[in-house]
Image: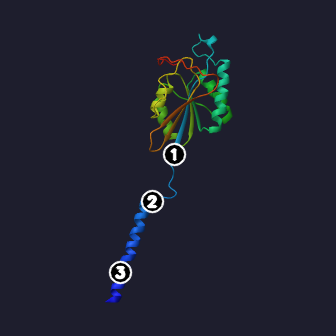
């Protein structure tokens, strides 16, 4: 009887130890579990356009704008973007040109009126990567919203070219949006949101 009791006690102790170990493993975070992927999107308005060519429907960059484009390249080339997006205008293409040369990436043209389509494409095709988008004063903030973020400013004035927005999209979390200035001196006079592409 004693032998059977000892055997049964041994089995119960073993079972309790096994169950305790299983519960502990279930509660502990899994080792080697993949971290959530973060997609980083940098957004800028095109640099300063040539006001002497303001009568043109598609003006080029001014000398100051060309300097700003070079600064943008210096800032973002080190971020190793996987893709560059631009609207189909001289000023946006020229803003992205130095970065395109530095990264050897071919800029992809998108329709600034279709921010949702671009946001979906970035989320699907560039998950966990870095992307740069050049747009216009009245298209960047809607694009931030399409990416799921909240714009950190209410509008972008006609003479504001130095905003560099960053949208970080982490799997399973709300996107985080930040903004900083870059390039030549910042001008911050506030105006209402423009209603057309500028």
Q: Are marks 1 and 2 in contact (CB under 8 Å)?
A: no
Instruction: Say which label, 1 or 3, has the lower sequence index.
Output: 3
Element on which disc 2 rests: loop
Check the picture and name the quadrant holding the N terminus.
bottom left
Local crowd size for mark 2, using a 10 Å CA cut-off: few (<14), some (14–19), many (≥20): few
Query: Toward the viewer: 125 or 51?
Result: 51
The residue that appears at 49% across and 37% down in the rendered structure is 176
Can you see residue 126? no
Q: How many marks?
A: 3
Query: Would you name the residue on which mark 2 appears?
Result: 28
**Residue holding disc 3:** 9
Q: Earlier in the sequence, mark 1 or mark 2?
A: 2
Q: Is residue 187 above or below residue 117?
A: above
Asked if one can make out residue 71 in the rendered structure from this viewpoint, the answer is: yes
Residue that mark 1 sits on: 37
Q: Is residue 198 above or below residue 164?
A: above
- The CA span between labels 1 and 2 is 22 Å
């Amino acid at each position: 009887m004693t032998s059977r009791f000892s055997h049964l006690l041994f089995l119960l102790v073993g079972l309790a130890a096994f169950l305790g170990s299983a519960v502990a493993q279930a509660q502990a975070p899994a080792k080697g579990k993949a971290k959530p992927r973060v997609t980083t999107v940098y957004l800028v308005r095109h640099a300063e356009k040539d006001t002497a060519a303001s009568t043109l429907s598609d003006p080029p960059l001014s000398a100051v704008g060309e300097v700003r484009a070079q600064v943008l390249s210096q800032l973002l080339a080190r971020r190793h973007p996987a893709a560059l997006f631009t609207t189909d205008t001289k000023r946006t293409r020229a803003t992205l040109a130095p970065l395109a040369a530095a990264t050897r990436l071919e800029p992809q043209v998108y329709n600034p009126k279709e921010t949702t389509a671009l946001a979906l494409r970035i989320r699907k095709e560039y998950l966990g990567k870095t992307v740069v988008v050049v747009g216009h004063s009245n298209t960047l903030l809607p694009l931030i919203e399409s990416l799921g973020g909240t714009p950190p400013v209410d509008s972008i004035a006609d003479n504001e070219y130095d905003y560099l927005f960053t949208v970080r999209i982490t799997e399973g979390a709300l996107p985080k949006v930040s903004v900083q200035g870059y390039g030549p001196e910042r001008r911050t006079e506030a105006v209402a949101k423009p209603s057309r592409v500028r």
